[in-house]
Amino acid sequence: MEITTLRFTDLEADWHTVDRTASDVEELEQELAQADYKMRTLKARIYGGDMGWQPGTPTAEDMAPGSSDAADYLSQIVTTDQLNAEIQAAEQHPATRPVPLYFWPLRQTGDESEPIRFPVRCQGAAGEVHFELPLVFYADVRFPRGSGYPAFTSLRDFSAQCEVIRAYESSLQGIVELPGVTVDLIGAATPAPGDLHEVHALHIAGVPDPVEDTFRPRLGTPDPDPYALPPAATTATETAAAQAWGVRVGMPALRTIMGDAPQPPAVLAQYAKDTALSYSKDYLAQGSDAVDAVLEVAGGTLPITFSGVADRSGGLVTPDLVADGISRKHGPVQLAGLTTSDPKDVLADGATLLGFDLRDVVSGLTGPPQILSDLTHTPPTTKMTWGDLTLQDKPPFKGGPQSTLELTVERSADSVTTTCDVTDFDLEMPPGAAALLTLHFEELKYSQVAGKAPDLAVNHVTAAFEGQLLLLQKLQEAVDLDKAGPDIRVTGTDIVASYQLPVPPVETGVFVMDGMVFRAAVLVPFDGRPVSVMLGFASREHPFTLSVLAFGGGGYVELEMDKSGLRRLEASLDFGAVVGVDFGVARGEVHAMGGVRYELADGEAKLSGFFRIGGTVEVLGLISVSVELVVTLAYDDTTNVLSGRATLVIDIDLTLYSDSVELDSGVWVLAGDPNAAHPAPPPLPPSRPVAGEPGGLRPPGGAFTEPPTQARAADAPNAEDADPASLAASWTAYRAAFAPTPTDALTDRRTP
């Protein structure tokens, strides 16, 4: 550090004193007694007894050149005389005497005096830094022992040193605000990427230099603090802080990586300019070339949370950290993770891979991710890299022999390049003996470049159904996902890679399925939800066709899984037969169909079924009669209630007259508590897709869309309690609301 030479006039000197305490009389008397005893002992030794010098014998002065005892005896005589004089002076002089110790150079500004701010130039590896700083001038005072006072040297008196150090710290004048300048805080002979920092404040303290008998500047106060200093403020306007610190820096690497992602205000402030750092004890003891973690977060931690904004960290992985230090090679780190390969020391709670706890599935860690900014370029470039990671089994995630994770994120003001590659792994859902589905991925790769939407490559994925879903294995074997490229959909919260391709006819025993479309989707959320997988064979609005011997029908299967297992399963199969005859003058048909639908969503199972039977007779095209009976059933496992509903519809068309009669039983509880809430049986599945009916693979994150259900007749009477007259009146009113009267039917339902 260099102070520019300046000349000031009309200055004020605000001198501060330290009390020089008089010698303690009692202590001096004890010291005198010890000196007197030693003097008498030496006297007896050189004169041969307590009688002292005798005439005709040599004196102590004569013997001193050849006798050390005689020399010591003479010295003790002088000491006792001095002690007697000091005791007399101490009893007469004041107990303390002020000694001028230090002063602040002041200059009058209006009605107040302010410390002069001296221009300072600091030279570092990254260039010069200029600022202004008030200085304290400390007097070199030296008093020998005497006149009732002990010896005093200001540059070696610990209490005097503490006095000036505390005064400077309390004034906060050593805190220098800077405009975010680039400073090499390490000064190593071999530079490292993490040596340069964006500095917003310096905390300059003075510490004694016992070798040179002076003070030297230091960034931050010593730890532990031998001077009982007040805590240093974090800004020039604050009066206290939790810990002493040396520098306050911004974190451009984290600002660039996180962008405008929502963060707590305190964390945003740390990223901007309020990350307080202090030098580690290892660095102060060993030097920069021997220590990687040179800087520690003072009085707290630096959270780095990608959960909820996974697109900033490669989409598939969120390497969350709670940094308590800055590594020269890696940037912000958890210090414990630099000396161990335990993932729980390297990563924070909340770090995930595909929604799984990253600390459970990663092994063989060689270090934390690197998050570094190149501050030598404009605009700065930030890189986050993490590679050579081996993945291990932690069901439902199962790592293969070549299972690895590679992450590279490079961002600047005008460029973005992101790649996250996970290879050779299985998802077993749910894990263990109860597994229903195992998905094998040769590679799952998230990538993004500037100006383009993110891309998710799903390479060579295969599915193996097990357990209760083993029936679907035959369908899966007819599908080759490698032949179909995924359709990528990107939103602000997730990215979905979906497949859709036709399936050749499948024969399984007496079953023949045709017209099937296989659908699959892999959802990668950015908001902390786990990765989920959806599979579907046909859909509710576009079922496949099914023939069983002489019978025909259709159906569909849809399922959704994530790390917790099977989230949703919906399957429906229906079949029946239609027999028609035509005798020229008369023709007719009779049909009978039935089906079952099972739905499991978030642990709640729904089972429903239907049976439909009817027929039509037409004579000469003038007279037709049709009868249709539909029975629907529904089971609710939460209330253990089986409910049903029956509807009979009769249509008569006599050319000039037509009418339709519909008899509806309402909802009846067939088993279970009749007073419990129970679901309405589902509506009759259409014989062909109904326009506008929802269905199919909905966007992930919830269950597939349910069809609308008919309203339940909540107050339907029990058959045993129904009054025939009131029941007939209710039926007439109900029918009038839906069926036209015979007069209206002549107009509305006449056959042309």
Image: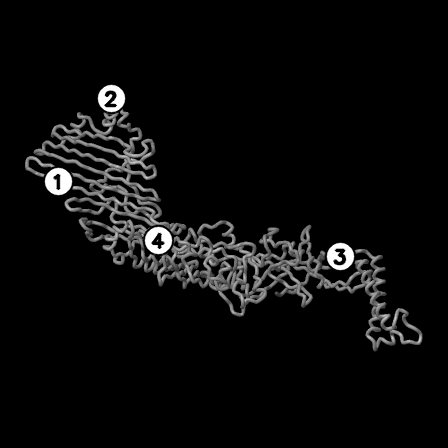
Residue type pointed to by label 1: Val
Residue for badge 3? 19
Q: Can you tell which mark lies on residue 637?
A: none
- Among the two numbered marks 4 and 1 on one chain, the one whose residue lies closer to the N terminus: 4
Residue for badge 4? 432
Q: Residues within 10 Å of mark 4 (few under 14, many from 20)?
A: few
Q: Position of residue 284 (x, y in %)?
A: 58, 64
Nearest to the observer: residue 474 or residue 134: 474
Q: Nearer the viewer, mark 1 or mark 3?
A: 1
Q: Residues within 10 Å of mark 3 (few under 14, many from 20)?
A: some
Q: Position of residue 320 (x, y in %)?
A: 45, 55
Q: Nearer the viewer, mark 2 or mark 3?
A: 2
Disc 4 and disc 1: Cα gap in Å?
A: 49 Å
Q: How many marks?
A: 4
Q: Can you tell which mark lies on residue 725?
A: 2
Residue type pointed to by label 2: Ala
**Residue placed furthest toward the front:** 49
Nearest to the observer: residue 117 or residue 738: 738
Residue under the image location 29 percent in, 51 percent down? 467
- Among the two numbered marks 1 and 3 on one chain, the one whose residue lies closer to the N terminus: 3
> Of helix, strand and loop, which one carries label 1?
strand
Residue for badge 1? 579
Residues at discs 2 and 3 in contact (Cβ within 8 Å): no
Nearest to the observer: residue 382 or residue 456: 456
Residue type pointed to by label 3: Asp
Residues at discs 3 and 4 in contact (Cβ within 8 Å): no
Q: Position of residue 184 (x, y in %)?
A: 54, 64
- Among the two numbered marks 1 and 2 on one chain, the one whose residue lies closer to the N terminus: 1
- Residue 589 appears left or right of 34: left
Q: Is residue 598 above or below residue 391?
A: above
Disc 2 and disc 4: Cα gap in Å?
A: 61 Å
